[in-house]
Amino acid sequence: MNNTEKTYHIERCGKNLPARIREYGFWIYPSGYIAPHVSKSTSPYEKCPKREFGFFTISHMHAGHGHLWLGDGREFDVHPGDCIVVTPGMPNRFGGINKEGYIEDTCDFGGPAAVMMQRAGIIQSGLFPLDRKVRRLVPIIEYTLDPSVESQFTAVFKLQQLLMRIYEDSLTKKKENPMLETITQHINAYPQKWWTVSELAEICRMSTTHLRRLFLRKTGLAPKAYIDAIKMNLASSRLLNTDTSIREIALSLGYRNQYHFSCRFKTITGLSPRSYRGKSKPPSFG
């Protein structure tokens, strides 16, 4: 039995739903509800511990500024309009940063139909652009507040449609940016290597001039600056989520020595690696 199968059995809501909803197998949990006119603010990122959920959760941020870390090593800044999806058993941390709140609408959900959507690749953990102007989860929440079977089914169908839209948009984005995805995969697979523009161009089978032009258009950065940004994101994640020494982190990311790495990290973040680690780790409670 895999982790998904284990966690789905401990989800906490199926018995409280109408029989027809239970039989359908896709459940939205009351604990995820908020009143349509009320926003929920999560804890600051630095105070959020690493955790795992026994259910699926979807969070649509509509105000503030946040940060997301996932247990597979991915890390993102979160801005209004972004949507976080976390699947059962995925280690995660997210919350507000830079003294700004993380203001969200959120739903927790689960059930065997949700598990099947995950196995099909439709529901995946990650950060996805959704909508900056419209709070897409509010109509779903409103329907869940009505106990009638018809409203409960409407909420379920609307959430499934939203998840399908997120999935289809992510597929479109991958098709539109195959070059960027390929390069990012290579950089993450070999973080200790300093890739030259010529090597990246060869991977993508294009000229260096064309590669630079595409990079600037897609990311706003030159290829070398993009590589540097990925390395800094990896460094930030390792400083926050591991006890690996700063020297080992520096060497693992291809820097000549700890001093060179620390200078570059401070230039990008405004903090030394030691200060960043000390300020960003959640407090210990024994």
Image (cartoon, rainbow, N blue to C red):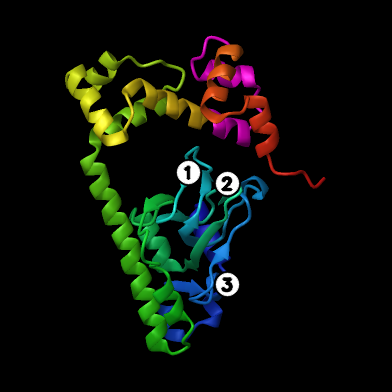
According to the picture, the residue beneath numbered tag 3 turns out to be 31
According to the picture, the residue beneath numbered tag 2 turns out to be 97
Q: Are marks 1 and 3 in contact (CB under 8 Å)?
A: no
According to the picture, the residue beneath numbered tag 1 turns out to be 77
On screen, 269 above or below 2?
A: above
Residue 79 belongs to the span the image colors magenta: no
**Separation (CA) of disc 1 from disc 2:** 9 Å
Please report the residue visible at 55 percent of the width from the left and 74 percent of the height from the top: 13
Q: Position of residue 33 (x, y in %)?
A: 53, 73
On screen, 194 above or below 83?
A: above
Please report the residue visible at 58 percent of the width from the left and 29 percent of the height from the top: 270
Q: Earlier in the sequence, mark 3 or mark 2?
A: 3
Q: Is residue 1 visible?
A: no
Give the magenta part as a residue range.
235-257
Number of on-image labels = 3
Q: Secondary structure at mark 2?
A: loop
Task: Judge depth for marks 1 and 3 and give the one in front.
Answer: 1
Q: Position of residue 162 (x, y in %)?
A: 34, 65
